[in-house]
């Protein structure tokens, strides 16, 4: 199943956040095996920074599977010093709570907060294991294996981990309705 819209049209301004598209090296895209993706660095007027990556897979039957940053981030030199779950509340007529995996990464004096989840076939999944279980379930019962991986990264810089996490969650609230315009639901 293709995305609802091509990710090349993903907005570079979301609320107060203004972004600039970026790209990985081709060898990274080759390794990821994504069918469509977007990589954008966003900044708020007060200097906060968020790196957004969304990788979309039309089918995960051919061996191209979503993989966890718990594997690739250490491979690029970052140490995972903490892993937990964060609850994100999406406001609206029917407020929705989703969970995201939170990583604290350190490399030398640099520290980053990462929030990520798998958004697949109408679900927001905060577990690599459940992502795979739902993949098999939906392949059998829905004949679908499309899915996406959503990752937000922010440097801690002069903020605390808590305040960095708070503004990442705020950005997630702003970005989820936009993601729903691109990623197929149920």
Image: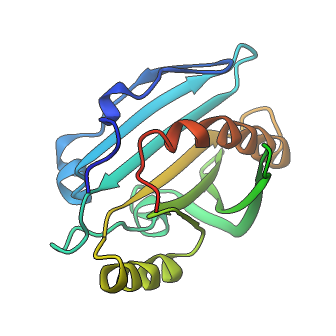
Q: Position of residue 1 (x, y in %)?
A: 26, 57
Find residue 137 and report its image quarter.
bottom left
Q: How many marks?
A: 0
Residue 176 is left or right of residue 4, and the answer is right
The image shows residue 9, relative to residue 143, as above or below, that is above
State which quadrant residue 100 falls in: bottom right
- Residue extending farthest to the top is 45
Residue 79 point in image, percent of width and height: 56, 62
55 or 147, nearer to the observer: 147
Task: Give how far across and how far down residue 14 sits, in percent.
Answer: 59, 23
Is residue 22 or residue 62 the one in the foreground? Answer: 62
Name the residue at 33% across, 36% down: 5
- Identify the image quadrant of residue 154: top right
- On the image, the x and y values in percent for residue 54 come to 42, 46
- Please tell me whether residue 139 is drawn above or below residue 94 in the rendered image: below
The residue at 67%/35% (across/down) is 174
Q: Residue at x 50, y 83 (%)?
A: 129
Way the structure is coloured: rainbow
Residue 98, placed above or below residue 42: below
Q: Position of 12 compared to 17: left or right?
A: left
Residue at 38% across / 68% down in the picture? 67
């Amino acid at each position: 199943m293709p995305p609802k819209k091509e990710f090349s049209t993903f907005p570079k301004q979301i609320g107060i956040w203004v972004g600039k598209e970026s790209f990985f090296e081709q060898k990274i895209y080759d390794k990821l095996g994504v069918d469509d993706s977007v990589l954008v660095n966003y900044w708020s007027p007060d200097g906060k920074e968020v790196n957004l990556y969304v990788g979309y897979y039309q089918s995960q039957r051919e061996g191209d599977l979503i993989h966890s940053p718990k594997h690739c981030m250490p491979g690029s030199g970052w140490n995972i010093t903490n892993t937990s779950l964060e609850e994100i509340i999406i406001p609206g007529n029917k407020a929705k709570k989703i969970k995201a995996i939170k990583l604290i990464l350190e490399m030398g004096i640099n520290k980053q907060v990462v929030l990520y989840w798998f958004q697949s076939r109408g679900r927001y999944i905060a577990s690599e294991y459940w992502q795979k279980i739902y993949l098999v379930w939906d392949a059998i019962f829905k004949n679908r294996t499309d899915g996406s991986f959503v990752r937000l990264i922010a440097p801690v810089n002069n903020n605390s981990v808590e305040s960095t996490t708070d503004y990442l969650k705020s950005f997630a609230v702003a970005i989820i309705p936009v993601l729903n315009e691109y990623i197929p639901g149920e």
